């Protein structure tokens, strides 16, 4: 096996003391961020983008991946003990985990979640090792029209699958594309939307947009609606599982990844859908169906395992195709751009050390996370008591550091604030933030590929669909566009059937 | 249904988003149309094509959004762990934070990062309701100095030290 040799080399990279340190730092930060309310993994990685100015790429990405996985682990702690999921992936964990915690079984819920994340992450990462080189090899000679098709897919997916309103998603995407247009045209050097300003000729830095939308926008939005009486976390002891609990959880742990991984890999799949699917599956298969809703441990184990596996799936499409399917992947893509590295099929050939070191570090990180989370969960839970003014002041503080580090200019701070106010407005009016970020990150690249493809075909639009790969991608795009009407029709039918059978199915995950 | 025009508008304040999108679209289109395309056009697709597409898209979305709002569609305000959507929005805090942040942007040059950063954290915590006369500034100072150390000295990301670092 070729990928096994590469993976061994990857472990050689990941196990160097420096990289181990970055992995440990990443999972520590990630767990803390996951536990802390109000900070998601995307915001965390965005806030840490400035370290890319001082760090070599392998270390930076090892740290980012640690944050991504760590935040998944930590997020379930908040869900279970506080019943307020921060990440959409952790919504399901709250449904069974919080009742368990209230019934005095919080320790078991935390253990089921932590081991579930470990199992899901391990299985997901193994699938990543097996699949990623294959996907990369298949896609290795894709050209401009194919890249453009992939980016169109990303745009469509992010606007039509996520969020409740497609029109607001498209509005957000267009705002992002507009921001991406600012600056000099890459091919002709003409100034676009610069209004004669020299500062704007460089374009709006992706770091500033990501930090502004994710961090400043979020902090200001929370400030406007700050809950004056914070929820009280349920006190909890050290996580452990009894024999009976183990008997009930091992199958859900193993089943979860096979739902999570594929959904993570497809555009805009993310973790929300597979965690919910896993929940429903476990409910169907459980012998303790009556406990669901009141604290069934299977309902924590399966979905949490699916959530971590979906993170691995996300990395497949991000690394092999340069296609970000979640907010974290989008910000990581921005980090790749900071280094001038283009993720895609060629990444595995050009940067084997980086890619395989990153993948190997995922295994290392998973072990570290399990060691950190099982015995230390009560310590992490203490983070839930942090005074909210400090938390959000800290977010503003680090966002300011990040934006200033971009170019050492105070004007960037003003731009950051303006983007942050934009993010505030978007949150107020239900415009999802992710499409805008994807628009800024992928917009300029998409334009370049479009113009290159049309240059080759001498302006004929057929130049965009002259490869089987591109045609296949556009077929998926059409499928996605048809998905929403289809889902609505299905939901209506199912609602009718449910009314007829009076079947006690659960409600969908909380809309957020 | 109320006929009071003020509350009618307040209920449909999302139309403002639509107006902004419209404005943005016009801006992008004007900019694209005034580009000097002929001189440097290389290939069939010049620098104006994509802006034209985006500009038209913005106009279309602005109209569709307005139609949606007039038909009763509403964007769902985003929830969150610390977000209480039932309480009325507290714009005073937001304004204070904006002020503190702008103050940081002005002061970072003359005062350097450690001092201005500490003021930023302290000011933001104060705006958000923290009132510890000793603990707040202490945390702010430690955080700011630590961050300066990590970024400027360890990671090699330069931050201005200001007069304070000149003394130390």
Image: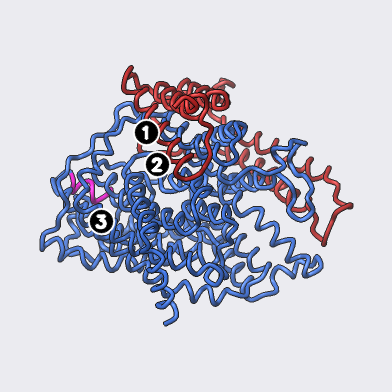
Chain colours: A blue, B red
Q: Quadrant of residue A194?
A: top right
Q: Nearer the viewer, residue B77 or B131?
A: B131
Which of pointers 1 and 3 lies earlier in the amino acid sequence?
Answer: 3
Observer able to see residue A508: no
Image mark for residue B152: none
Q: Nearer the viewer, residue A456 or A6?
A: A6
Looking at the image, which residue is at 21% across and 48% down?
A376
Q: Quadrant of residue A365?
A: bottom left
x, y percentage for residue A168?
Answer: 56, 44
C-alpha gap between disc 2 and disc 3: 20 Å
> Are the residues under marks 2 and 3 on the same chain?
yes
Contact (Cβ within 8 Å) of mark 2 with mark 1: yes
The residue to which callout 2 is attached is A39
C-alpha gap between disc 2 and disc 1: 9 Å
In the image, taking residue A58 as reference, residue A106 lies left or right, namely left
Which of pointers 2 and 3 lies earlier in the amino acid sequence?
Answer: 2
Image mark for residue A114: 3
| Magenta span of residues | A94-101
Other residues around mark 1 within 10 Å, as few (<14) / some (14–19) / many (≥20): some
* Main secondary structure along the magenta-highlighted residues: helix
Which corner quadrant holds the N terminus of chain A? bottom left
Q: Nearer the viewer, residue B7 or A471?
A: A471
Image mark for residue A391: 1
């Amino acid at each position: 096996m070729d990928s096994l040799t590469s993976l061994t080399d990857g472990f050689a990279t990941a196990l160097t003391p420096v990289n181990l340190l970055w992995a440990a730092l990443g999972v520590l930060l990630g767990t803390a961020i996951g536990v802390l309310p109000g900070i998601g993994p995307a915001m965390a990685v965005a806030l840490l983008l400035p370290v890319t100015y001082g760090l070599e790429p392998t270390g930076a990405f090892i740290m980012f991946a640690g944050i991504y996985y760590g935040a998944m682990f930590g997020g379930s702690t908040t869900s279970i003990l506080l019943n307020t999921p921060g990440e959409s992936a952790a919504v399901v964990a709250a449904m069974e985990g919080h009742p368990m915690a209230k019934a005095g079984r919080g320790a078991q819920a935390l253990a089921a979640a932590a081991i579930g994340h470990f199992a899901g992450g391990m299985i997901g990462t193994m699938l990543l090792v097996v699949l990623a080189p294959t996907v990369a090899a298949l896609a290795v000679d894709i050209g401009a029209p194919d890249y453009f098709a992939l980016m169109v897919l990303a745009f469509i997916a992010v606007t039509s699958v996520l969020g409740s309103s497609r029109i607001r998603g498209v509005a957000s995407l267009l705002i992002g594309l507009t921001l991406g247009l600012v600056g000099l045209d890459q091919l002709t050097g003409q100034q676009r939307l610069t209004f004669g300003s020299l500062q704007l000729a460089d374009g709006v830095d992706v770091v500033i947009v990501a930090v502004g939308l994710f961090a400043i926008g979020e902090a200001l939005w929370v400030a406007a609606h700050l809950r004056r009486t914070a929820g009280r976390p349920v006190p909890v002891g050290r996580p452990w599982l009894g024999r009976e609990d183990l008997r009930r959880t091992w199958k859900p742990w193993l089943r979860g990844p096979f739902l999570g991984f594929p959904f993570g890999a497809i555009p805009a799949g993310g973790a929300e859908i597979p965690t919910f699917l896993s929940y429903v599956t476990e409910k169907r298969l459980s012998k303790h169906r009556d406990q669901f809703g009141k604290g069934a441990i299977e309902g924590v184990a399966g979905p949490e395992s699916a959530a971590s596996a979906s993170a691995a799936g996300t990395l497949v499409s991000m690394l092999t195709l340069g296609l970000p399917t979640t907010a974290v992947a989008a910000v990581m893509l921005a980090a790749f751009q900071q280094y001038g590295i283009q993720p895609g099929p060629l990444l595995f050939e050009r940067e084997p050390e980086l890619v395989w070191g990153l993948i190997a570090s995922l295994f290392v990180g998973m072990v570290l996370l399990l060691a950190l989370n099982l015995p230390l969960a009560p310590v992490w839970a203490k983070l839930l008591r942090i005074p909210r003014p400090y938390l959000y002041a800290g977010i503003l503080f680090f966002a300011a550091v990040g934006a200033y580090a971009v170019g050492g200019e105070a004007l960037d701070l003003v731009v950051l604030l303006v983007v942050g106010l934009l993010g505030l407005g978007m949150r107020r009016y239900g415009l999802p933030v992710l499409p805008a970020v994807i628009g800024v990150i992928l917009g300029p690249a998409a334009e370049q590929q479009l113009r290159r493809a049309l240059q080759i075909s001498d302006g004929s639009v057929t130049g965009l669909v002259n490869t089987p790969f591109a045609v296949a991608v556009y077929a998926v795009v059409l499928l996605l566009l048809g998905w929403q009407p289809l889902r609505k029709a299905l939901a209506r039918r199912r609602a009718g059937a449910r009314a007829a059978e009076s079947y006690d199915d659960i409600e969908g995950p909380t809309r957020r | 249904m109320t006929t009071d025009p003020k509350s009618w508008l307040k209920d449909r304040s999302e139309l403002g988003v639509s107006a902004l999108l419209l404005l943005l679209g016009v801006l992008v289109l004007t900019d694209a149309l005034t580009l000097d395309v002929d001189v440097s056009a290389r290939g069939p697709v010049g620098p104006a094509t994509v802006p034209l597409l985006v500009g038209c898209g913005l106009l279309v979305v602005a109209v569709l959004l307005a139609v949606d709002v007039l038909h009763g569609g509403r964007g769902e305000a985003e929830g969150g762990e610390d977000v209480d959507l039932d309480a009325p929005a507290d714009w005073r805090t937001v304004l204070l934070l904006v002020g503190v942040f702008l103050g940081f942007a002005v002061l970072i040059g003359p005062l350097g990062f450690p001092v201005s950063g500490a003021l930023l954290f302290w000011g933001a915590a104060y705006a958000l309701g923290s009132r510890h006369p000793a603990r707040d500034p202490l945390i702010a100072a430690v955080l700011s100095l630590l961050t300066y150390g990590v970024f400027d000295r360890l990671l090699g990301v330069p931050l201005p030290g200001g007069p304070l670092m000149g003394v130390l």
